Structures are given as C-alpha cells and as structure tokens.
Amino acid sequence: MRRISIVRAHCRPLQFYRARRCLPAQFRALSGNNRMTDSPSPSPLQSLRNKHILLGITGGIAAYKSPDLVRRMRDLGADVRVVMSRGACEFITPLTLQAVSGNRVHSELLDADAEAAMGHIELARWADAVVVAPATADFLARAAAGRADDLLGTLLAASDAPLLLAPAMNQAMWRDAATQANVGQLVARGVQLAGPDSGDQACGDTGAGRMREPHAIAQAVAELFANKMLSGRHVLITAGPTREAIDPVRYLSNHSSGKMGFALADAALEAGASVTLVCGPVALASNPRVQRVDVESAEQMLEAVLADIDSADLFIGAAAVADFRVAKNSAQKIKKQHGQTGMTLELVQNPDIIATVAKRAAKPMVVGFAAETEQLLKHARAKLERKGLDMIVANDVSRADIGFGADANEAVLLSRDQEIELGKCSKGQLARHLIKLFAQQLKPAG
Ligand code: C5P
C-alpha cells in the first residue's frame, strides 16, 4: 500500500496551479499595451464564487482604484481580505477598504488585536490567491528579494497560493533595469502579472506603467482558478442529509450541512465539468451553472441519481443518506396517548444509493465519503470494499472543528492501493484538491 502525505500540498491546493504556472509554456504574463477605458461585465463563465482572495495594496496613486477592484472581485463571488502597506494608507484609508470588503483591514505585522482575530499565518493559509494591486516598484523589489519585514511580505512568504501582481508606476520606473530584473525574477518563480497598461500617467508622462483597470484584474484573478481537467465530463454529486418522514410534521435526519458536496460541485464546475447536484434539504445556494435537483428522502435521492447516471463519468456520494426510514409513514400527525410513556418506531433499511450505482454494469468512476467517529481508516476501507467503490474520502466527524457543519475539513483519500492524507483546510480547498485527484484517476473519455 502506498501511503502519501500531502498535508501541506492540500492545505494549499493551488500549489497545483503553482506547479503549472512554473512551466514556461503555461506562463501568462498579462502585460499588454491596450489601455482599457470601458468596464465590460466579466464573462459569466469566470467566477470567484467562494474564493478567498487576499488583496495587498501598496503605496501608489493607483490605490484609489483598489476599492473598485474589491467590489469587482466581490461581484464575482469572492470573499476579500485586504492588507495595506504603510504607503498605501497615505493614499487611501483602511476604513474605505473595510467598508467595501466587509472585512477588517490588516496593516501591521505586530498588531496583537489583529493577530488575535486572525493571525498572519492563518491569513496566509486562508488565501486561495494573493493579489497585489497596485504593486509599486519598491514592492516588486522587496518581493523579488523575499523580504518579510512587514505584513504583506510575511504573508507572501507564508502563502503557497498563486500570486498575481498588478504593477503601477511611472513609465521610467517600469522601464528601469532594476525593476525589470525584479519582475523577471518574480515571473521566473511563477508569479503572474496583470499589466501594466500603457497610456497617460498621473505624473503627466505617457507610457507603460498604468495599473490595469479593476475589472480586467478581477478577470485575471478568476482565470487563476480556471482549468480544464474535467472538460467535457459529467459529474453527478449527492449532498446534504436526507429527511425520512415519520408523519407530516416529524422526520428522521442528521447534521449534514451539504457544504462539502456543494464545494465539490463548485470545484468540478471550475474544472470544466457539467455538474448535477442532487441534494437533500440544505440551506445553501448553488452556482446557477449547476443542475440542481432538490429531494427529501433517500428513495427520492436514488430516483434522481438513476435518472442522471447514464451520462455521468464521475459519481460522488457526499450525501449523508439516512440508513433507515420509518416502515409506515403516518398520513396524520401521531398523537400522544394519555398515559403513554414510550414509543417504538419500526424502521426499514433505505436503498444504498452509492452501492446501487457501483453495481451497475456500465458505471462511472464512483467515489464515496466515510464520516466516522472512530477507527476512521479501518471503517472507511471496509466501506470501500463492501460498496465496490473506486475511492473513498474518510473524515472524522467526532471533531467539532471539521466535518458536519464546519467550514474546514481534514480527510484521507483511500483507493485500493493508496492512502493520501489531506491535511486540514477549508472545504473549498479540499474540494479542489479532491477533484484534481479524481480527474487524474478518470479513464479517458469515450
Ligand atoms: O452511511 P455510510 O457511512 O455507509 O456512507 C458511506 C457512503 O455511502 C457515502 O458516500 C454515502 O453518500 C453513501 N450512502 C449512500 N446511500 C446510503 C448510505 C450511504 O449512497 N443509503
């Protein structure tokens, strides 16, 4: 059995993108000469839904455009946290950025209050991508040198998330050999550039050095996440709990929030798949591009899954399906009888949805979830074999910080011959990493 630990890699699933972007052919220096004056709406395909974007603002006049960038990224669905350098605070106030981002702004490395709320390492881990706009000549020099003597520098050093810089400076400073050498070093390390654009500058010069317009930077940030791993593939996912009626007002259910299944649906979309999400009763909104089928009971979930299974390349059973339902669901509310001290409900077994899918002759790749409170790997492996799955994601739901309802998760992905440990991270990050691993195992289409 091969045991692989990629705790850090998966905490920063976007290391994957970093690996890709290190390939020269994958380089996308977005620098160009077109001055953008209009503000077209972003393509509906580009989304930052549920992405954590850390925006660094450094001290240049273009910082006046940074609140608009925050707004554009939020319009695309991102949760944005802002880090300002001292210089940036001379151009624009933290209060403005706090108002537009809806989050407290971070500016000092040694700030006990800010550290208590979200420490700088935690902030670095939180980020799915780091964007610096505007990125001044001084910042580029500091970043190229790996300086970590202020908050932004420390965050860059501590984060493995992809980094996108939007340089903004006087045209002579941009052309300066030292600046170009710094940019060259950063690009060689896989950092991406958005701009600068050419045109009139605040100082009266004309030339390359204008910060790219906020809508175009937001678009470039969204493109960091776009990939084609599941292009042309259909992914069918179950999510959430099921609800098994006892009578018209009562039911049997469980604590599943559906967050993991919804995060997988987003990650599969991001990877280019068409996605059907069959979900039990949850309080979550899904991406409009997901084909969502809402159900209540396990039997309804099975019916919805079977209606879509023939076209699926990958089936992911992330739902916490109730194992049993009430044998006889009462048409009327069951009344307490006078003097009654107890009650017995007869339960019958529900269909096992994932096992039904895995038994089909023409079946897609099948991945299950094992939510366990003890002997995690043993129980998960037994389920993998008993249900005939290709892979199973095992997670310990006895811990309050991960699993049901929590925003974070920690899991081990088991296949017949591998165990891949996936350390603690957000459900969104875990989902993206899992989708990448599933895509690698998928048989070629056709
Ligand atoms: O409930 P259990 O731990 O057996 O669930 C393991 C896997 O089986 C999960 O992927 C779950 O979605 C799936 N399952 C199912 N139908 C059931 C019970 C579980 O698809 N009735």
Image: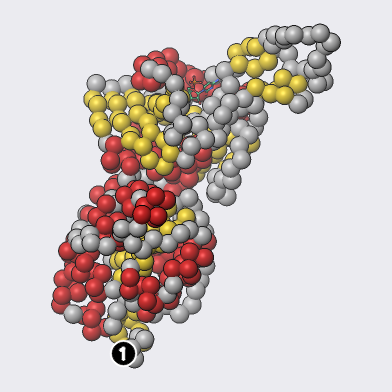
Q: Position of residue 353 (x, y in %)?
A: 54, 22
Asked if 50 appears above or below 330 in the picture, the reply is: below
- Are there few (<14), some (14-19), or many (20+) residues within 10 Å of tag 1? few
Q: Is residue 319 left or right of residue 153?
A: right
From this viewpoint, which residue is outermost toward the front? 112
Q: Secondary structure at mark 1?
A: loop
Q: Is residue 22 visible?
A: yes
Q: Position of residue 111 (x, y in %)?
A: 35, 58
Q: Is residue 284 left or right of residue 223?
A: right
Q: Position of residue 217 (x, y in %)?
A: 40, 67
The image's colour scheme reads: secondary structure
Q: Residue drawn at (58%, 42%), measured in percent from left and top?
A: 284
Q: Residue drawn at (48%, 58%), measured in percent from left and top?
A: 103
Q: Residue drawn at (40%, 55%), measured in percent from left and top?
A: 113
Depth check: 425 or 241 in front?
A: 425
Which quadrant of the figure has residue 93? bottom left
Asked if 129 appears above or below 136 in the picture, the reply is: above
Q: Is residue 123 left or right of residue 250?
A: left
Residue placed under numbered mark 1 in the picture? 205
From this viewpoint, which residue is outermost toward the bottom? 204
